[in-house]
Amino acid sequence: MSPTGSEPPRMNRKKGDKGFESPRPYKLTHQVVCINNINFQRKSVVGFVELTVFPTVTNLNRIKLNSKQCRIYRVRVNDLEAAFIYNDPTLEVCHSESKQRNLNYFSNAYAAAVSAVDPDAGNGELCIKVPSELWKHVDELKVLKIHINFSLDQPKGGLHFVVPSVEGSMAERGAHVFSCGYQNSTRFWFPCVDSYSELCTWKLEFTVDAAMVAVSSGDLVETVYTHDMRKKTFHYMLSIPTAASNISLAIGPFEILVDPYMHEVTHFCLPQLLPLLKHTTSYLHEVFEFYEEILTCRYPYSCFKTVFIDEAYVEVAAYASMSIFSTNLLHSAMIIDETPLTRRCLAQALAQQFFGCFISRMSWSDEWVLKGISGYIYGLWMKKTFGVNEYRHWIKEELDKIVAYELKTGGVLLHPIFGGGKEKDNPASHLHFSIKHPHTLSWEYYTMFQCKAHLVMRLIENRISMEFMLQVFNKLLSLASTASSQKFQSHMWSQMLVSTSGFLKSISNVSGKDIQPLIKQWVDQSGVVKFYGSFAFNRKRNVLELEIKQDYTSPGTQKYVGPLKVTVQELDGSFNHTLQIEENSLKHDIPCHSKSRRNKKKKIPLLNGEEADMDLSAMDADSPLLWIRIDPDMAVLRKVEFEQADFMWQYQLRYERDVVAQQESILALEKFPTPASRLALTDILEQEQCFYRVRMAACFCLAKIANSMVSTWTGPPAMKSLFTRMFCCKTCPNIVRTNNFLSFQSYFLQKTMPVAMALLRDVHNLCPKEVLTFVLDLIKYNDNRKNKFSDNYYRAEMIDALANSVTPAVSVNNEVRTLDNLNPDVRLILEEITRFLNMEKLLPSYRHTITVSCLRAIRVLQKNGHVPSDPALFKSYAEYGHFVDIRIAALEAVVDYTKVDRSYEELQWLLNMIQNDPVPYVRHKILNMLTKNPPFTKNTESPLCNEALVDQLWKLMNSGTSHDWRLRCGAVDLYFTLFGLSRPSCLPLPELGLVLNLKEKKAVLNPTIIPEAVSGSQEASSNPGSHIHLAGFQNPFSSSQDEEEVDMDTVHDSQAFISHHLSMLERPSTPGLPKFRPASARSALLPPRAPGFEGTPTPTLKPPWALDLARKGAGKEQVPLEMSAHPATAAPLSALSKESPSKHSEHHHHHHHEHRRKKKKHKHKHKHKHKHDSREKGKEPFAFSSPASGRSVRSPSLSD
Amino acid sequence: MADTASTAGAGGSGTRSGSKQSTNPADNYYLARRRTLQVVVSSLLTEAGFESAEKASVETLTEMLQSYISEIGRSAKSYCEHTARTQPTLSDIVVTLVEMGFNVDTLPAYAKRSQRMVITAPPVTNQPVTPKALTAGQNRPHPPHIPSHFPEFPDPHTYIKTPTYREPVSDYQVLREKAASQRRDVERALTRFMAKTGETQSLFKDDISTFPLIAARPFTIPYLTALLPSELEMQQMEETDSSEQDEQPDMENLALHISTDESGAEKENTSVLHQNPSLAGSRNGEETVIDNPYLRPVKKPKIRRKK
């Protein structure tokens, strides 16, 4: 960063600012990360980091870094011991003494907590005091080296250990560990500046078992054995300035594959999977070529690594010069369905290497540019690889998704700008979370955010042409690569950061076009456009009178003003018109080119220049209009509801060449169940030139139409004869041909048709017997012996078809479902499911697709009352140790059961799994599924909705999920779905709560409060590090932090407490209190930066472990102790609270401070909170690994 | 041959020790057989041109012959039992002889040799009374190399075969039907068996046997079975058996879509990898030259680096 002199760092960067202003009073230039011990058995990591930092202000006395979970042993600055404070308000967002249970309150508090440690605002959990000896040094702006020793024990987030419990060494067991997380989560595994905007060069060292490989960002310089030859040290150098958030690590007994086409690319997978890895990655070089070609820029890093790991956090995670993938993406050449999906993942990961890793962002509000560009070039790759149809289909799909999401939740804002003081006009007030930070975002919102970002990039492309677009990207990349090669000019590195304004400036420089209106509409503003269109043909004037209305009052919508393209297909050809959508004009007159002339038989020219013969008999005799399309190029983020006659939709389906138009017409035809629609759909189905996805959609539409016209339907069930003709033997039409999936289009159609057919219903609303027999025959005669490909997905879809055929059971008086009254059709279905499910145990299929389908089918049978509803089977499949797809399918069934049967027990079981399951993805997914399919909602009454559940969920999001942003946001989503923004209705009236808060004596009487009333001495010991402060750290903080004045006494109370705690356990805590006094008094007298530190750093290295263990035990014993103390608590407690208010350590929340000031009397409430912590601790080992506990051991009082 | 002789010796000694209690009828049979064998050995010696032989050498040869024949019997019995029969067939004997290193092809010629001696039938004390059976047709006379005292051929109807031909099932529909039901039966039987022998789960509380589900058992490494399913291994094995059969000519859809693109890409890849040995070869050659840091040898620790 250019030295800003004495100018204080500014936190809010204004749009249009030229360069990047660091929020920090220093510039990080280089960081060393050394992990010298990784213990898979204990799941622990020991290491150190060293940050090279140049102060940019003269009076720099505090350095804030990010660190979570890590236990920090010692910090040295230029070899001098430095004091530090660790304070992480996100561990517990709202203090538990607060009986507030409304989400609004929580969201605000959570956003404030995240802000308080947000590196983009110059904050951090770890605050290091620069030793006074160095102050002069700092004033000269000379380099500081910050050396931090840390360890990590049983991390719950950030680093994920996978340790299968089998025999053998860790390498033989396939144990591995990898970094993971949502957005900037590197702070979970080593102390750093966890911001995408603080770039530096890196040296990374990992010492691992000799049988393991450590893969990390940058170039592997060398691998060296340790002296005992049992371990190896991997030395990595990353000379391209990179943000800590883009650093990653994967360690495991990986098999290594050097890419045969690009030797600098290396692939890694878990043992035994090498053949799959070879096949899966054999395509990657083409993706490389594609991106390098369109960006006219070489891949920025000197190497690239792909690592495929188990229990992945996300399918694809891109980091500097490496990507971590889920091992479940690997597949062999026999698998059809997974191939395009995996290739997409590879391409996505690679796109993010350019934009996201190499080019990083200035701030969170610039994220959309990176996601947009990487998503956009990924789209270009899709177009090239899978064709224009697939691409357009994908764009349409994404557009539909974002439109549906925005209309549902009220808008996704790409570029939020937060005005300085105007906190009130929150740009996202419609949401139940803050969009100010990535870590407060709902996962679904973030997914949609990415989706919108790339769609908007496409809109920009529409405006300025692809050529210019690519030039802009090239410009960004070349600027960045020039900057990255400036090894010793770190102020240049900010060129590697992209900002919204910089990006827009590039666009205007390159293209000379003003895209401000577009940006204003889609980037600076949330919402999509909702058009309603209808038309009339005026024969006299030969004019098409088009009426286009907008709904811009519903949530998630916005008003559109500007050009709108309309394509009109007339008899004489296709004509594009650009309408100007203005404030008050609804009607648009479009002159028609052709007179209606149906007698003249002539070919009709289409938009793409083709000419088509059409049977025009269906047309309106007076009108020359065949069909009309509004915004055919999807140049607006919109939803169009357009009214035109059924025959027009049918013409559009048959003759319009654009797949999007075809899909739109298929959707519209659902409302026109006529023989003509049927014919149009059947024709499409048979037409082999037609895009396969359109044909698949036509299947389902045909099924719906057939059901609507069930009374007039003639002939065999829909699609049956078609399927027979396409896929069955000529001689025996009831037998399907032996599988041959060489033609993928036919394969997809063959898979889909039976699934759609099974949705057919007869007049009694039952699936026709003929259809069921047909599907059963398909299963029976399925023969894959001569096929080159696996048929597991096909068979799975056949089971889906069986499930689709199930209709609700006719039930007499809620009789119990037994085998005897089982419907004979269902018996046949069950027979198949049983056989399939059992065969899976003996001959499993790829990714267990068949088990997944069977589980879903069983749930359908249960739900329809054919089989007794019972979650036991699903619960057994949901256990850890099953393949993740199976688990998710089983959990989905349990979630559904919980909802349908309103089962409290199952809900508890799920919640327990959310807290304890070893796989982060599964935990996330359960929350996600519960949110999507909630057992009850805020608007419905349910016996499940009770106070205990509220407390449980509150605790989950408040403190139980502090190790995983995504999980916490998932819990917030669930809470919102269940209880809404305000106080849950099932809670007792809030007045009662107020009474509790005001009247101390009564509080004691209240059963919910009593257990929390404990002595103040315990709180600090057990508090997971939210306010352990160090002696000698009394330098005033910046003015904003004056409120957080450190209270030394309490701190030392707590530290002394730890030392005394073990021996004090049996005794009631209050009487012991006086003993603490001397210790704390003494330590308070110690000079800043306790001198004892320098002499005795090493002995403390061991104690933390021992103490930690001891305290674990202590934590458990604490509970009964406190319980027994209750009856007698009231008096001593009040005495204590009178005595100690001033000593009580302050908390970090501003709102909390206000709260405190108002009610000075009730200081003891804080104790409730800490008490609460300590109780939680017994359940949550995480709390013990907090760095603060490690820190406190080194307290001066101990070293005495 | 040496082998059999030694084992025969051992066997012989065993029997000899048993012959001490000569009252046993089994021993009488043994002695009678032994006598016959001696005659056989003697006649063979005569045939070979010997005029006289020492008793000890005749005894040794007898011993050898006996053990050789015993071995044929024992071995043939094993072969026959191995194929789950109780009666040895000719093929058992043939296999035995082959196994013992005897060239079976030479046997017929040896049997028909001109200068062979025929041993007279052993004296039969009292002819067993064979019940008169209904004779049908003409019994075949003995061929010249079979002594006349050997039993007569049985009635022709007992061994004459009349081959009948039934059209093999070639109807496609029936075949498919058969294959399908066969597979289904096997699968059902197998899964039922597995379900019977292991833990099960059931969808109905009142009935656990109609639809038994093999209980779900978690794996220690679940992704391995999911990504390397044994099903595919089986299929791959079968595929190597049934060689390439691209009989489907309707691959005309080379149009626009994803799949063609993809299959194209796939084919390219595979063709590059498999059908282009020159490239593969050059790659192999290069392999030694590939400079990838992960392939480099691990360095020995430097001395100065002290821990």
Image: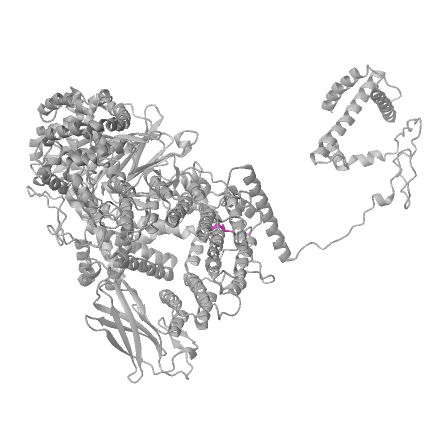
- In the displayed structure, A391 sits above or below A190; it is below
Q: Is residue A1032 left or right of residue B258?
A: left
Residue A1148 is situated, as x and y percent measured from the top left of the image, at 15, 38
Indicate the quadrant where residue A561 lies. Answer: bottom left
Question: Is A791 included in the stretch rendered in magenta?
Answer: yes
Pick the front one: B271 or A810: A810
> The N terminus of chain A lies in which quarter of the figure?
top left
Is residue B94 in view from this perspective? yes
Left or right of residue B137, residue A150 in this image: left
Rendering colour mode: one colour
Q: Provide residue A414's location: percent of width, then percent of height.
A: 22, 55
Q: Quadrant of the C terminus of chain A?
A: top left
Give the number of callouts: 0
- Please state the horizontal and vertical placement of residue A531, each as a whole percent of the image: 27, 67
Q: Is residue A1025 above or below residue B3?
A: below
Q: Is residue A63 above or below residue A825?
A: above
Q: Residue at x 18, y 45 (%)?
A: A991
Q: Is residue A27 visible?
A: no
Closer to us: A865 or A427: A865
- Across and down, in percent, residue A556 comes to 24, 59
Of A654 and A777, nearer the camera is A777
Quarter location, residue A467: bottom left
In front of the other: A507 or A1009:
A1009
Helix, strand or loop: magenta stretch: loop
Q: Is residue A729 left or right of residue A145?
A: right
Locate residue A947 relative to residue A649 in the image: left or right. Answer: left
Magenta segment: does it hold A327? no
Residue B55 in which image quadrant: top right
Region in magenta:
A786-793
